[in-house]
Structure formats: C-alpha cells, structure tokens
Amino acid sequence: MRAKTLTALVTAAMFLGASGAALAQAKPKVDFGKREYDANCAVCHGANGKGDGAYKPYLTRSPTDLTTLTKRNSGVFPYYQLVESIDGRRLPPGHGRPDMPIWGADYMAKSAGDYTDVPFDPDLYVRNRILALVDYIARIQEK
C-alpha cells in the first residue's frame, strides 16, 4: 500500500513540476524596450528601425536608420548621444527645434497621470523608459 501511495505522489509531483515548467515557458517575456519602440518610434523609423515608417512621406527629413548607428559611429554604439536625442529636454538654447519629438517631456507629462496616489521620482520614470528604448535600439544594430 505504501509503495503505491509513494509512487502516486512521485508521479503527481513529476506531473505538476512538468506542467509548472511548461506554464512558465509558455508565458511570454515582456520586452519593454520593444514595446516602447513600437508605441512611439515605429511610425517614423519603421517596424524594423530602417527609417521607413508610415509617416516618412510626411516628414521634411527622412528618419534615421536606427539599425546602422553603431556602424556609422566607427563600431561604437552612441549610447549617450542616443539617450540625449530621445530625451530632447536638454537642447542648448538657440539651436532650433529638434527633428523629432521631445520624448523626455512627453514621458514626464505621462508620469503625472500614471502615479497620482504614490510617491515616485518622475525623472527616474522618464530615464527608465528611455533606457529601455535605447537598450532595444542597441539590440537591433546590424552586425
């Protein structure tokens, strides 16, 4: 009797362990950088970052091909320049309008609506969204 009970328990544990692992594998991981890119950048830069988005015909300058940033920067990903370009809030006075939206200001405005009932750091919120986006752009660089 004990052998049957033990066998049943071991079988049940193996089944539950296997189904738990399958459920964990089935749940897709969220790529926050890609989600940010798809929501805010793809319309101009294109789904693959090649600068061929749906808004391209309506822009005065063609959007940058984001997949060649490293190649055009002598093999070094221009991390800091990209962060500053996306943020856009630190433009020197008198340098005119940027060629793309000032996402730092947009994210800052959105943060106020997202976190109304808890204390938070709005600059950290903005920085995290921009860094997720820059990380995604770094991953789509051509080799």
Image (cartoon, rainbow, N blue to C red):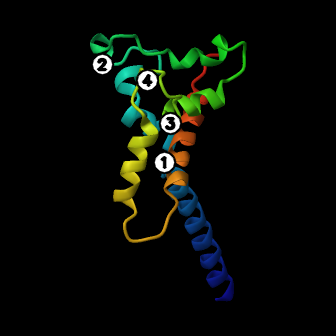
Tell me if residue 31 can be seen: no
Q: Residue furthest bottom?
A: 1
Q: Gap between marks 3 and 4, in whole Å?
A: 11 Å
Mark 2 or 1: the one toward you: 2
| Mark seen at residue 98 | 4
Q: Which residue is mark 1?
A: 28
Mark 2 or 4: the one toward you: 4
Give the answer, above or below, for where 3 lies relative to 41: below
- Which residue is found at the position 36% from the left and 18% from the top? 53
Kind of residue sitting beneath label 2: Tyr
Mark 3: few/some/many CA within 10 Å (<14, 14-19, 20+): many
Tell me the SS state at disc 3: helix
| Mark seen at residue 55 | 2
Mark 3 or 2: the one toward you: 3
Kind of residue sitting beneath label 4: Pro
Where's the C terminus, which quadrant? top right
Question: Seen in the image, is 63 located left or right of residue 15?
Answer: left
Spot occupied by residue 4 in the image (x, y as percentages of width and height): 63, 81
Specify the quadrant of the image occupied by residue 138.
Answer: top right
Q: Gap between marks 1 and 3, in whole Å?
A: 29 Å
* Of callouts 2 and 1, the N-terminal one: 1
Q: Residue furthest front?
A: 94
Spot occupied by residue 31 in the image (x, y as percentages of width and height): 51, 43
Kind of residue sitting beneath label 1: Pro
Q: Which residue occupies the foreground of this view, 74 or 95?
A: 95
Tell me the SS state at disc 2: loop
Question: Seen in the image, is 23 located left or right of residue 117?
Answer: right
Spot occupied by residue 135 in the image (x, y as percentages of width and height): 59, 36
* Of callouts 4 and 1, the N-terminal one: 1
* Of callouts 1 and 3, the N-terminal one: 1
Determine contact: label 2, label 1, CB under 8 Å: no
